[in-house]
Amino acid sequence: TSLLDEEGNQDESLDSKTLSAEDQVKDHSTGTRVVAGQIFLESGKSDSQSEDEENFHSQEEEKENSLEELNSLEMSSLLNKDLEEAEMQSPVLTAIGGTADGEPCHFPFLFMEKEYAECTADGREDGRLWCATTYDYKKDQKWGFCESEEQSNKRRQMQEAEDVYQIGMKILNESSKKAQKKVAYQYLLKAADMNHTKAMEKVSYALLFGDYLKQNIQSSKELLEKLTEEGSPKGQMALGFLYASGLGVNSSQAKALVYYTFGALGGNLIAHMILGYRYWAGIGVLQSCESALTHYRLVANHVASDISLTGGTVVQRIRLADEVENPGMASGMLEEDLIQYYQFLAEKGDVQAQVGLGQLHLHGGRGVEQNHQRAFEYFNQAANAGNSHAMAFLGKMYSEGSDVVPQSNETALQYFKKAADMGNPVGQSGLGMAYLYGRGVPVNYELALKYFQKAAEQGWVDGQLQLGSMYYNGIGVKKDYKQALKYFNLASQGGHILAFYNLAQMHATGTGVMRSCHTAVELFKNVCERGRWSERLMTAYNSYKDGDSNSAVVQYLLLAEQGYEVAQSNAAFILDQKEASIVGENETYPRALLHWNRAASQGYTVARIKLGDYHFYGFGTDVDYETAFIHYRLASEQQHSAQAMFNLGYMHEKGLGIKQDIHLAKRFYDMAAEASPDAQVPVFLALCKLGVIYSLQYVREINMREVFSHIDMDQLLGPEWDLYLMTIIALLLGTIIAYRQRQHQAIPRPAGLRPAVPQQEPPPEHQPPQ
């Protein structure tokens, strides 16, 4: 029987025991009850786990197509929603099977003294949805299913997939160990195989980046295509990325743009950010500042609303190219032994070390993971020693609350007061917040303003930001946009995200300043780049350090699409070094050139010089000395790069892409030496070479025979010049002979010492054969 085959092992066949619909209603034995065609013992246990509709197999098969057509809209939405949403049905539903096949469901209906306004699975062990076709089920026993058996199976399968997905997510969120996270992804893989949308999104991204699963672009692409068909914004965005970067598919900027647009329309923030950057830089679309502003502002609103008073996590922007040039200098990462040294000092009672480590663990960054428990412990130790900074930060932790520190306005206020009394700007700012929002004290704008001013005077960014907000909104003071702008600018210099956000809003709307779309976009872009997705910069860096260049390059490429200049230059660097096997050898230089170009347009000097190098040597493009010269000149004029100046000197010297000019070459070499001390040695060698070339060129230009023929030695040195010359030669010869004789004189030796007589070697013929 086809329906039983679909059901699998859940229901046993009871064809021999099946009753007619009429018998099920009227003639069931004492001690049993019938609920929607399923027989139950009074104890609640099923006498059999078979459904009554087996009598209607032939009828259902005949009606299946027509019923699916009638309910297609309802069923498609039903299958794509969670269990609760799946149970919500349109009022115009037709019963399938049961005792009232083809009749409309009656809502509400009464069952077990309870009214139901929608289909229910109550009273059935198999969880299949049913409805009554009259108001009183008990009286009329008229019922039917709200879904076909196939739809029921799919719904139950989705519920099972949801359960597996939740188990995986629970393990993933609760564990920091890599092995546990890998186990979690096995659950997610299982849920993805059962077509669970969120699990498929997780797994497709893990396969794309090589996170806890082996990197497999092809498998990821297949999942993303499936997700895109289902309308997943995450899937659409990621598929757009594959087409933009040409990973696993032929590169197509048009398709990428379509998928990015659909992803953005579905509310995906990364897709909005990518479109914002594309409109800003004019990549694949006409450059439009206003369109870029729309996308960036939307993302910035989300990022700003997600920022706590502590300012969010620190974004580490590590350039791989700079790190190769100066190992350990550019990264800003703290070495493990240095952290251990600080921990040793903190344990010995060094208050500054305790406060420093507390801040590192509170915010995370510089190679230290965010850990509120350790931050709280270090601040406590320093606060007990009387450090005002630690007291203020404890106040912050209590004010915001976390899993480690319970939220308490009263405790926060005590710490803020102690710190503020000691003149600490963090404490003053915290106290100002308490009075501004009435946290533990009555609202008092005058006091809030007073404390914010004290904190701002000491250069504390939170104080400056809040003071700017008070002037902007006219809280406790008269509205003053100029003052607001002043304090927002000061806070932005300290790197506060909300200061950038507020400045962006002012420039976007022309409040207190001349409206500037360009400035607003740049400020909003800065805010967007501080979102949670920026954590992938560190993930990519760690992947690269672990030797997984393929994983690192894919992560950097996605961040590059989002407009991160550091990701563009890092992706280009990995491609330039030919470390990523995921990209074909013929494509590495052209792709690297593309990303060097994007990084250079955002002002990165090394990228601009790289563009010059690629056109000079013909990497990923044709050899073009004129274009190379233009890039070097831009790097020289805009960023005062010594390397670019040196290269310009060389090109003038050789006449490459420009008319040969030795004087200009010397000028550029001299400029390079002035711009950087590192350039002085190569410039000295280049100038020596230039001097030799210049001399040879001068000699070549004059006729030597004519010069000697015009020289009159008698007139120049006198009539007896030959005698003078012979005398000078004789004196020189005498000096050399005297010097040589002096060298050969015996050196006196101390008494009693005799030179060792060297043993004479036998003649060659007596030597043993070699």
Image (cartoon, rainbow, N blue to C red):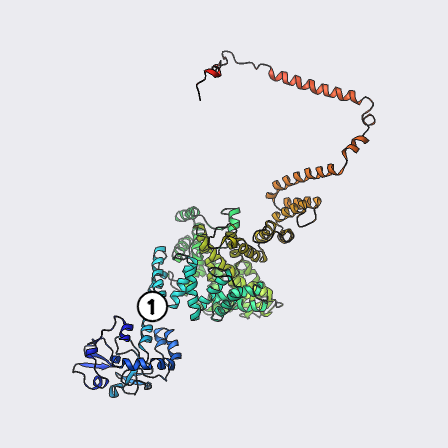
Question: Would you place residue 58 above or below residue 423 in this image?
Answer: below
Closer to the camera in the image, 770 or 557: 770
448 horizontally vs 44: left or right: right
Q: Quadrant of the N terminus?
A: bottom left
Residue sitting at x 49%, y 54%: 584
**Is residue 676 at all visible to an observer of this figure?**
yes
* Rendered location of residue 636, percent (x, y): 63, 51
Q: Amino acid at mark 1?
A: Ala
528 horizontally vs 7: left or right: right
646 horizontally vs 150: left or right: right
In the current view of this chain or complex, which residue is farthest to the top?
752
Residue labelled with disc 1? 161
Closer to the camera in the image, 630 or 222: 222
* Rendered location of residue 341, percent (x, y): 42, 46
**Is residue 465 at all visible to an observer of this figure?**
no
Q: Quadrant of the C terminus?
A: top left
Question: Would you place residue 538 above or below residue 770 in this image?
Answer: below
29 horizontally vs 502: left or right: left
* Rendered location of residue 605, percent (x, y): 58, 52
In the current view of this chain or complex, which residue is farthest to the left?
30
User: Dot 1 surroundings within 10 Å: few (below 14), some, or many (20 or more)?
Assistant: many
Question: Would you place residue 541 above or below residue 398 in this image?
Answer: above
Residue sitting at x 53%, y 64%: 253
* Rendered location of residue 596, percent (x, y): 56, 55
Residue sitting at x 53%, y 49%: 322
Closer to the camera in the image, 146 or 422: 146
Task: Residue 201: name its quadrant.
Answer: bottom left
Task: Residue 289: name its quadrant.
Answer: bottom right
Q: Secondary structure at mark 1?
A: helix
